[in-house]
Image (cartoon, rainbow, N blue to C red):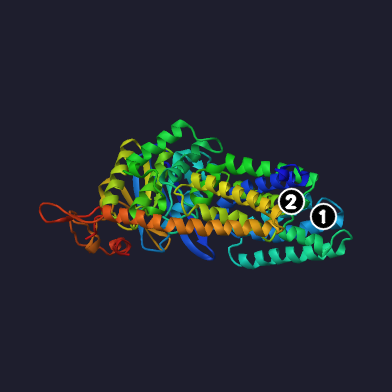
Amino acid sequence: MEILELAFMQRALLAALLVGITAPAIGIYLVQRRQALMGDGIGHVALTGVGLGFLLNASPIWVATVVCVLGAVVMELIRSYGRTRGDIALALLFYGGMAGGVMLTSLSDRGSSASLSTYLFGSITTVSREDILAICVLAAFVIVTTVGLRRQLFAICQDEEFARVTGLPVRLLNLLIAVTAAVTVTVAMRVVGLLLVSALMVIPVAASQQITRSFATTFAASVGIGVLVTVSGTTASYYVDVPSGATIVLMAIGLFVVLTALATPLARRRAGRAAAQEQCTLDGKGRSTATDDVRV
Amino acid sequence: MEQPVIAVRGATASLGSRPVLRGIDLTVGRGEVVALLGANGSGKSTAVRAIVGQVPLTGGELELFGTPRRRFRDWKRVGYVPQRTTAAGGVPATVREVVLSGRLARTKLGPARRADREAVVRALELVGMADRAGDPVAALSGGQHQRVLIARALAGEPELLIMDEPMAGVDLASQEVLAEALRDQVERGASVLLVLHELGPLEPLIDRAVVLRDGCVVHDGAPPRAVGQHALPGHDHVHPHADPAAEPIRTGLLS
């Protein structure tokens, strides 16, 4: 396979693999607590980091990481404290981040709208050696957090109030979720782009839960789907000259549609079987006995 | 006198600018089963949420196992059953996975061990849900879901159970299973504080009832008898007291 002999494609495939693992791994917790679009917000904020990186002549990926983490922490604080007008505060943060990125990029000598668009939509084949090193380090952090603390993060996203009463450091763990999501955004931005990052956090999870019944299998299946679409999307974009980010996201949506179509008759059959079990049965005295008693 | 497991003195709390608790006193002794009754908006949910630290007190004192709430860290002694949330998580989860969360007070950030899994099985057996361990919680009825939340609290093997409306929306069959599970806990020496709308099948278990109205305690003593439409079959139908002082009790039960 000549594709594996090219250094830039090796880097691209490694980056794709890591994004395929990390984005659904943190995304599942965001979906669980119904914050599916948080990744999108962080992606907007990341743009300021990229612009700042251009302006300071520093590595955009590291500067974006710092800015994303700060933005995600602010978002988490708004979520946990500011109940009223929280959506307005978030809107200010998102669009401020986007506008700031465009402004800072135009002020720098290095940046141009062309280089900005490689971050907006991803440009996996231009991933450099330094980028791949950063992606590996950041991805390792995301995997250790999302797998190592899965029971704790699951409990917090399932029922935050209960989790607090177990004495878990919930505030700290919530910040950790936000920081991990921010780090994932910077891991994924070179592969699928900041505007499509959130898709990889959400769609593999949405697709896999069409056929799964437990959190553990949803987690495994989401990561499996994530890896499948990122690696095959990247490969496809090598052979057919199409942008990697868009290919990956469209493949993920395609899988979602296929799995939903497959799962619908399955769910219907399962529901039918359950209904058959719960039907009223007449006992000898002609009285009906139902499993659920009726209040009088 | 032995130290109470819950001691609340003159507690006040507000939600927004509205005072919800206006100086309540409440104690639960070791091994005691106390029901907190009252109409909607009387402050009973806020009271239990304040006890578990989810609502800040604006005044008064609150102690758990003799330790001021702010310094209390021994959460594995407390099993909490929050009011059942209508919305489940956005991702499927099995009964077993949800109940395992109840062990977090013991495992903290560490891994789940064999003892934790065994405690989950025991807790599910107590509420009669062992055969549903692998089922997704989204497929359960309201009563079954409530049993799972109680199993989650029992999985931590707590000394004190705090339950917010454990019987709300629960079918009679499940109510009886829950009453049985609770009786078992009480026999083992657990203390219980529970918010109830009506005494129902739990009545024989309850040692004392505290009735709230408008954020104040209006009755603290023997459980009021069930009246009117809330009296279940098999219960004695008694007329409400003619004594006007008993009026708040009836209001509470008919809410």
Residue B109 in the image, given as x and y percentages of width and height: 56, 38
Secondary structure under tag 2 reads helix
Q: Is residue B117 above or below residue B138?
A: above
| Quarter in which the N terminus of chain A is drawn | top right
Q: Is residue A143 left or right of residue B199?
A: right
What residue is pinned by disc 1? A53
User: Which residue is painted at 66% across and 53% down in the image?
Assistant: A236
B38, B168: nearer the viewer: B168
User: Which residue is painted at 57% across and 59% down in the image?
Assistant: A253
User: Where, by quadrant of the figure, is residue A101 drawn?
Assistant: bottom right
B66, B118: nearer the viewer: B118
Residue A97 in the image, given as x and y percentages of width and height: 73, 63
- Which amino acid is tagged 1? Gly
Report, in whole angstroms, how far the alpha carbon at label 2 lies from the one at label 1. Answer: 10 Å
Residue A123 in the image, given as x and y percentages of width and height: 74, 55
Callouts 2 and 1 on one subunit = yes
User: Which residue is painted at 79% across and 53% down in the image?
Assistant: A60
Secondary structure under tag 1 reads helix
| Quarter in which the C terminus of chain A is drawn | bottom left
User: Which residue is painted at 66% across and 67% down in the image?
Assistant: A91
Which disc number belongs to residue B83? none
